[in-house]
Image: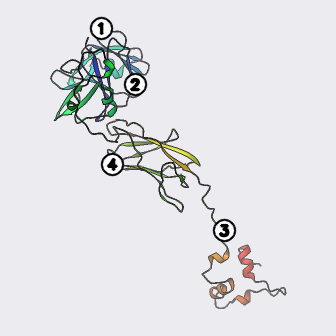
Amino acid sequence: MVDVNLAVVSGQRIIQAESLSASSNPVTIKAVKGARYVLAEGDKLVGPQNITVKRSGKNLWLMLEGHDQPQLIIENYYDHPGELIGRGEAGDWHNYSSANADRAEDPAALQDGEMSPVLLSQENAAQLENLSVDSNALAMGLIAVGVLGTAAALVFITGDNHKDDKHDAAPPEAIEELPTDDTANGKALIDNITDDVGAEQGAIAPEATSDDSQPTLSGSGLQPDSSVEISDNGSVIGTAVVDAAGNWQFTPEAPLTDGQHEFVVVVTDPQGAVSAPSDPAVVIIDTSSVPAAEALSMEDLLPADSDLMSWAQLSLPEELNAESLVSPVNDHTSNTLDDLSSTGHFPV
């Protein structure tokens, strides 16, 4: 029996590649929300016929023809659903759907424990075009899905995993170098973390200390309308939406506690493709060095080079003067302006 090759496509990127063999243990992969799981076999690289799928809890099992045990297990598929697709004889792409034409028996609609034979549907699926290949998929040496000119094609590469196979590996010059980027389909990035308070403001260096308990995180180069999920020390603290220029920024609504903070972002593009998490960006917040506000005295409120008496002389109505506010009750002639500065009101 011919082995079946699998490529996991998230957005416009091939993020994983595997070879499914009936003679080996099942391949287990983790589901990616909105991913397309491309199956192909033979010289024409068409989708295999007569496969069976089964729901087992949150997982989807895929069994090749003639087998009742899975060759592929997609973990948490029913929490993060995607599409099973294959290429038809005419070169178009099709979803796998129930062989009985019953929507309730399509892979994504199965109930726990249900099993369903599926075939390539008659309806065309969205075509695979302008795809780039993640370095992990190439490194596995099993399969890459690429673009040759304007027509989608599958390029198979035999890897060291199958040392008993008689296939020859594709020569290096036959493997197209495809661009990679750090967008929602690749690995997310935090471009800057900015301190907006205190004497020292601006970009915070990695693992540096900041007195800003609500620093601003930002990034760029993403698809507009993508969603950026921000986590701090493993807990989600908010989301940001990418603007029309591909930029995003986020400032925590509540002040963060003093101590070390590891920020990580994950990006979901408008097509539902989820990025790999960014590398942690570490910042140490320390607000203990922020100086306390100094209490103001009466003199702080006066014009420069003034004293209470001269200020009163200038500020009182003409019919009054500072001397009229001096009490004759005692020999020390206490100035009631002194009382004002200490009590906030004139004595009665």
Q: Amino acid at mark 3?
A: Ala
| Residue at 37% over, 36% down | 274
How packed mark 2 is, by other alpha carbons closer than 10 Å (few <14, some 14-19, many 20 or more), is: many
Q: Which mark is residue 78?
A: 2
Tell me whether circle 3 and circle 4 mark residues in contact (CB < 8 Å): no
- Name the quarter where the N terminus is drawn: top left
Q: Amino acid at mark 4?
A: Gly
x and y percentages locating residue 114 in the rendered image: 38, 14
Is residue 11 at all visible to an observer of this figure?
Answer: yes
| Residue at 71% over, 74% down | 344
x and y percentages locating residue 220 in the rendered image: 36, 49
Q: Amino acid at mark 1?
A: Gly
> Which dot, 2 or 4, sits closer to the camera?
4
Q: Give the alpha-carbon distance from disc 3 to disc 4, as whole Å.
A: 46 Å
Q: Amino acid at mark 2?
A: Tyr
Q: Which residue position is annotated with label 1?
A: 66
Question: Which is nearer the N-term, disc 3 or disc 4?
Answer: 4
